[in-house]
C-alpha cells in the first residue's frame, strides 16, 4: 500500500480551503495507480489525470500567491475570463481531475466495503465498473464507454492489484484493506470538498468528452 500511504493527503481545515501546493504534491503521485490496474489498458485515464495536474500546476506556478488555494484558482479565473469561464484554464482541468480522483475513490471504497462478484470473488471488475459508472461514464461518448467495458474485462485479480499497490510486496489482504481505509479518509474529504466547491460556484459542466 506504499503507493498510497507514502503521499497522504492533508486533513482539511475547518473552512475546507485546499492549499494548491500540497494538493498538487499529493495528487502528483497518483497516476501510477492506473499501472496497478493493467498498464496500457487504463493509460487514457492516467494520461488525462497527468495532463490536468500539469495544467493546474502551470496556473499555480504563474502566481503562487494569488492561487494559494484551489478556491482562489476558480475565483481568480472567473474574474479573468468572464463568459468563457468555467471552460478554461485550471478550472476546467480541476473539473476533469476531480472526476478521475472520484474513480479512484469509488473503486477503493468499493473494495474496502467488500463488494464483489460472488461467482468470481477475486475479480475487481465489479468495483472498477461501479467506479466508472459513478465517476466518468456520463461524460464519455459511446466509443469511450465501449473501450472501458473492454478494459475492465482484463483488470487484474484483487490479490495482484493489492500487491501492485504495495509495490510488489506480499501483504495480507486485511492489512491492505485497512491501509486503503486510512488513505481514503483525507482523500475522500478533499475530493468531496472540491465537488462541493464546484456546485457552490456553479462551475460544473455536463458535456461529453
Image (cartoon, grey):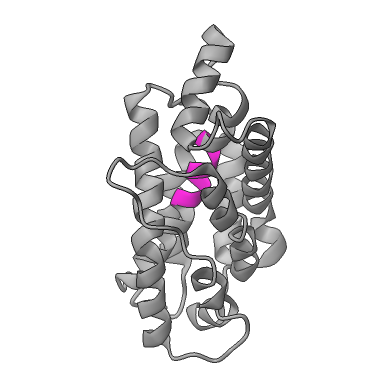
Q: Is residue 106 visible?
A: no
79 over 98 or under it: above or below: above
37 over 1 or under it: above or below: above
149 over 108 or under it: above or below: above
- Figure label count: 0
Quadrant position of the C terminus in the picture: top right
Q: Residue furthest right?
A: 40
The one nearer the camera, 93 or 127, is 93
Name the residue at 41% across, 72% down. 180
Magenta part, dominant SS: helix
Name the residue at 56% across, 34% down. 141
Name the residue at 58% across, 12% down. 81
The one nearer the camera, 43 or 147, is 43
State the image coordinates of residue 152 (x, y, percent, origin top left): 55, 61
State the image coordinates of residue 8 (x, y, percent, origin top left): 47, 65
Does 61 appear in magenta?
no
Quarter holding residue 48: top right
Quarter holding residue 33: bottom right
Does 99 appear in magenta?
yes
State the image coordinates of residue 54 (x, y, percent, origin top left): 68, 42
Q: Is residue 155 visible?
A: yes
Give the magenta range: 95-102
The one nearer the camera, 109 or 142, is 109
Q: Residue furthest front?
A: 65
Q: Is residue 105 left or right of residue 14?
A: right
Q: Residue furthest top?
A: 83
The one nearer the camera, 184 or 122, is 184
Name the residue at 35% across, 51% down. 12
Amino acid at each position: 500500500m506504499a503507493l498510497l500511504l507514502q503521499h497522504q493527503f492533508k486533513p482539511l481545515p475547518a473552512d475546507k480551503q485546499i492549499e494548491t501546493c500540497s494538493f498538487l504534491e499529493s495528487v502528483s503521485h497518483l497516476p501510477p495507480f492506473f499501472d496497478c490496474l493493467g498498464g496500457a489498458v487504463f493509460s487514457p485515464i492516467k494520461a488525462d489525470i497527468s495532463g490536468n495536474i500539469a495544467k493546474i500546476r502551470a496556473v499555480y506556478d504563474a502566481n503562487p500567491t494569488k492561487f494559494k488555494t484551489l478556491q482562489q484558482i476558480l475565483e481568480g479565473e472567473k474574474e479573468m475570463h468572464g463568459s468563457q469561464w468555467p471552460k478554461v484554464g485550471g478550472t476546467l482541468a480541476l473539473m476533469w481531475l476531480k472526476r478521475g480522483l472520484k474513480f479512484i475513490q469509488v473503486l477503493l471504497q468499493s473494495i474496502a466495503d467488500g463488494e464483489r462478484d460472488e461467482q468470481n470473488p477475486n475479480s475487481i471488475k465489479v468495483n472498477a465498473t461501479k467506479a466508472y459508472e459513478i465517476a466518468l461514464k456520463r461524460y464519455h461518448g459511446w466509443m469511450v464507454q465501449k473501450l472501458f467495458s473492454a478494459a475492465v474485462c482484463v483488470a487484474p485479480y484483487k490479490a495482484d492489484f493489492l500487491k501492485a499497490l504495495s509495490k510488489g510486496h506480499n501483504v495480507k489482504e486485511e492489512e491492505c484493506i485497512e491501509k486503503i481505509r486510512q488513505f481514503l479518509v483525507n482523500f475522500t474529504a478533499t475530493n468531496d470538498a472540491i465537488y462541493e466547491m464546484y456546485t457552490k460556484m456553479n462551475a460544473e459542466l455536463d458535456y461529453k468528452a
